[in-house]
């Protein structure tokens, strides 16, 4: 039997769209209940939101302006490209329902936008918003992406996440039950989580109705509480070398079902903000190395799941 190495995002998008589709990040000016006092203060210990905002992405600009700026950025290379508006920074379901609807609808009204990806926290998905998103998913491509980060409650407390794993599992199930595509995001290498714990996490996530998963290596970012913790107690951290992380990522996806899209394996923070680990590697270079190693190991996503 011929196995694909893993189920990649481009293949997944090809089921929904013909031609090239690109995500464009939108900063909608939201905050987060873990910053404004509703759940906590100071945010998650690893978080500096500048790390994932492209230059065209600024909350001073309207959603439409940000999308049009982003399109100009990409269309030079691919004139026929279409786009998914990606509400990425902070918690993009955290606000009045009327304001959320207005922003999502504004994005969908921009010419060339063919769907939405909404990044959020699992403790910020009220039923009334799910009612609206369910209706929206019948009109357009829609994926909701939850920050899970860890399946270990002790780790979640340590990183000041403000919710437990059961909350994440519940939000994923409730969203899936509405027929909405569900994504998740985890960080591999948080303090206290070694290989065995991470492989246990993979097996747990395999039981959830996740359509898509993003894996990120732990990165220490300037100006975060975690960076200070690292200075004080470096022995608490296991910062992966690239080849070691590739082995871990392969071991991890061997435990995930072949129906789960692996959107990415690494995050890339701006070098001006990154303390460690600095692999000096672009995403495509990493993926090429990982794929070569999977071929060498004669393995594939889901290999360790019994049918």
Image (cartoon, helix red, strand yellow):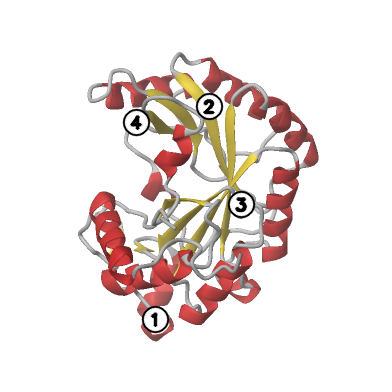
Judge depth for marks 1 and 4 and give the one in front. 4
Q: Nearer the viewer, residue 41 or 93?
A: 93
Residue 48 lies left or right of residue 288; in this view the side is right
Judge depth for marks 4 and 3 and give the one in front. 3
Judge depth for marks 2 and 4 and give the one in front. 2
Q: Which residue is mark 4?
A: 56
Which one is earlier in the sequence, the residue at label 3 or at label 2? 2
Q: Secondary structure at mark 2?
A: strand
Q: Which residue is mark 2?
A: 115
- For disc 1, the neighbor class at 10 Å (few under 14, some 14 to 19, many from 20) is few
Residue 53 lies left or right of residue 93; in this view the side is left
Residue 210's disc is: 3
Q: Quadrant of the N terminus?
A: bottom left
Pinpoint residue 33: horizontal percent, then vertical percent.
64, 50
Which one is earlier in the sequence, the residue at label 4 or at label 3? 4
Rounded to the nearest whole Å, what is the CA distance between mark 1 and mark 4? 36 Å
Q: Is residue 41 above or below residue 86?
A: below
Rounded to the nearest whole Å, what is the CA distance between mark 2 and mark 1? 44 Å
Rounded to the nearest whole Å, what is the CA distance between mark 3 and mark 2? 19 Å
């Amino acid at each position: 039997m011929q196995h694909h190495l893993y189920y990649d995002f481009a293949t997944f998008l090809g089921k929904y769209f013909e031609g090239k589709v690109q995500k464009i990040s939108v900063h909608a000016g939201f905050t987060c209940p873990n910053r404004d006092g509703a759940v906590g203060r100071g945010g998650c210990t690893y978080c500096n939101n500048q790390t994932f905002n492209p230059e065209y992405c600024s909350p001073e600009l309207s959603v439409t302006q940000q999308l049009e700026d982003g399109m100009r950025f990409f269309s030079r290379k691919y004139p026929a490209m279409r786009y998914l508006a990606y509400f990425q920074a902070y918690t993009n379901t955290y606000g009045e329902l009327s304001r959320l609807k207005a922003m999502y609808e504004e994005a969908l009204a921009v010419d060339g936008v063919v769907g939405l990806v909404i990044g959020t926290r699992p403790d910020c998905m009220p039923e009334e918003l799910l009612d609206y998103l369910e209706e929206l998913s019948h009109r357009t491509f829609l994926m909701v992406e939850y920050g899970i980060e860890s399946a270990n409650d002790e780790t979640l407390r340590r990183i000041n996440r403000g919710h437990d794993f059961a909350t994440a599992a519940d939000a994923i199930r409730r969203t899936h039950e509405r027929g909405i595509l569900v994504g998740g995001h985890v960080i591999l290498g948080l303090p206290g989580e070694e290989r065995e714990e991470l492989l246990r996490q993979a097996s747990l996530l395999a039981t959830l109705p996740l359509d898509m998963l993003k894996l990120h290596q732990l990165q220490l970012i300037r100006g975060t509480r975690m960076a200070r913790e690292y200075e004080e107690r470096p022995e608490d951290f296991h910062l992966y070398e690239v080849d070691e992380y590739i082995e871990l990522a392969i071991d991890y996806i061997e435990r995930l079902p072949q129906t789960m899209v692996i959107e990415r394996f690494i995050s890339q923070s701006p070098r001006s903000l990154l303390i460690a680990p600095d692999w000096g590697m672009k995403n495509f270079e990493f993926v090429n190395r990982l794929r070569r190693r999977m071929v060498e190991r004669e393995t594939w996503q889901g290999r360790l799941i019994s049918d």
